Image: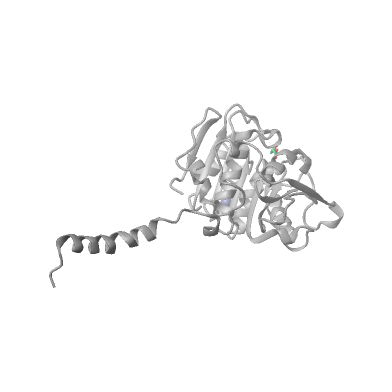
Amino acid sequence: MFRPLVLRLVTLFAAVALPLVGATAPTATAADNPYERGPAPTASSVLGNGSFAVSTTSVSRLSASGFGGGTIYYPTSTSAGTFGGVVLAPGFTATSGSYAGLARRVASHGFVVFAIDTSSTLDQPASRGRQILTALDYLTERSSVRSRVDATRLAASGHSMGGGGTLEAANSRPTLKAAVALQPWNTDKTWQGIRVPTMIIGAQNDSIAANSSHSIPFYNSLTGAPERAYGELRGESHLAANTNPDWQGRLMVTWLKRYVDSDTRYSQFLCPAPTSTALSDYRNSCPD
Ligand code: 9J3
Ligand code: ZN
């Protein structure tokens, strides 16, 4: 009936402590998230190319309907499972080849990236948005790499009018997991309807899609997005998407990892807000 105090304390300790040990001992592993791809990121790994070798396949304009073909950048290996898919749309008068560096970089971190051409290089943002969605469908349903893409984990991206199209695509298809608009341009500044986690990447010295009249109003209007961020690249021009600065890659890759792959190993790069001399502004909806 009466046990010595020390035994009662041992029993109490076991009852309280063992479940705690059981609950806290496991650390996060790949098994916790089936969509994690590649090694745990570091501050240097997110500023460069990822761990995956990248192959390409071209999609001819003639074989495409509703957009203009392009080039798909994809991890060569099939041993890591399927990857999230991203369509990257060009700016006014531009073509897919101008974005080869950025497309390859994002793919090397474990995404299938389709850098598209538009039906006409003069198409406006609303048309570019429809073309992004048509190209995502092509990527997952008809492309030669469709078996490598997880059709449930897709993102829209694009530069300038293609970034304006990215907002259009996210607004039209709320099942997208993420959107990343690069130096975006659009006459519509009202994106309250977007329900997709959306990152806007501006360039400090952009004189074509000025941040004060494009990126910042877009960011401010994203009040319905579950998460939003605005990163501004210090010293960069409107052509940042073409010249592929490391911090643009870091911002885009971390956003896609966090929301397309649900990879919380990358949360540390988004929240709290990154601080770097490479950024002239950063705004976000922390915590994510
Ligand atoms: O690169 C772009 O898509 C810029 C948008 C633009 O030049 O708009 C002027 C009509
Ligand atoms: Zn609107």
Residue that appears at 66% across and 33% down: 238
Q: Is residue 34 above or below residue 111?
A: below
Q: How is the image coloured?
A: one colour
Q: Is residue 182 above or below residue 82?
A: above
Query: Residue 55 appears at what percent x and percent y?
Result: 77, 48
> Is residue 217 or residue 262 the one in the foreground?
262
Q: Is residue 146 left or right of residue 226?
A: right
In the rendered image, is residue 51 in sight?
yes
| Residue occupying the far left of the picture | 2
Left or right of 54? Residue 152 is: left
What is the count of numbered marks?
0
Q: Quadrant of residue 252?
A: top right
Task: Give the left or right position of residue 208, taking residue 196 as reference.
Answer: right
| Residue 187 at least partly seen | no
In the rendered image, residue 281, in percent from the top left (x then y), is placed at: 51, 33
The percent position of residue 109, horizontal first and vertical second, equals: 65, 46
Q: Determine whether, in the image, residue 245 is placed left or right of residue 198.
A: right
Q: Residue at x 58, y 30 (%)?
A: 204
